[in-house]
Image (cartoon, helix red, strand yellow):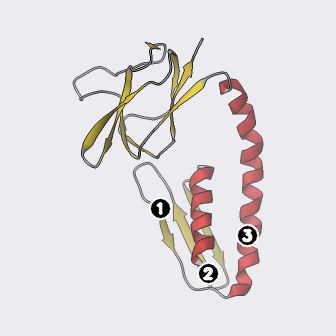
Amino acid sequence: MDIKEIQNLIKFVAKSGASEVKLEMQDVKITIRTGAGKTETTILQTAPMGAMPQVVAPIAAQPVASEVAAPVAESDDAKYITVKSPIIGTFYRKPSPDKPNFVEVGTEISVGDTVCVIEAMKLFNEIESEISGKIVKVLVDDSSPVEFDQPLFLVDPS
């Protein structure tokens, strides 16, 4: 098993939403843990090249179930526009701990309204809405790490 396959496995586990996956076969032991605010950890012991097909087969069976469930949830949200994170950082719903949230579910927003703040490298970046509408859903918890292009809010443009 080479490093590229391990990286792909880590990405797959992170996207699947599983909090921990352990694989043990012959000379290979891999444990991958994911979670909010934690980095992924991989523990690997060398393996013969013959073990590779065994690793791929059990993993390939998992995404089928998650891919079947995903379109059902997306069809409800298809009519909404998603506000996504333009940068990597820490998501905050308030300008400071003693202030109210920028937006709540049901809040009407306009183009240019600040919807949240993302801290990146000790800089607080105000994220402004590029659309007008009503906040339908907040998709990220306050003080959570966010990735580039990660959905933050669902907005009903009507």
Q: Which residue is drawn at 67% across and 21% down?
A: 79
Say which amino acid is labelled 1.
Answer: Glu
Q: Position of residue 146 (x, y in %)?
A: 44, 44
Indicate the quadrant where residue 7 lies. Answer: bottom right
Q: Where is residue 155 in the image (x, y as percent from the top left)?
A: 54, 21
Q: Residue furthest left?
A: 98
Front residue of 104 and 43: 104
**Local secondary structure at mark 2:** strand
Front residue of 143 and 77: 77
Say which amino acid is labelled 2.
Answer: Val
Look at mark 1 in the image and give the residue it sits on: 40
Check contact, mark 2 vs mark 1: CB within 8 A.
no
Front residue of 96 and 26: 96
Q: Which mark is residue 28?
A: 2
How packed mark 2 is, by other alpha carbons closer than 10 Å (few <14, some 14-19, many 20 or more), is some
**Local secondary structure at mark 1:** loop
Which is nearer the N-term, disc 2 or disc 1? Answer: 2
Depth-wise, is mark 2 or mark 1 nearer the camera? 1
Look at mark 3 in the image and give the residue it sits on: 56
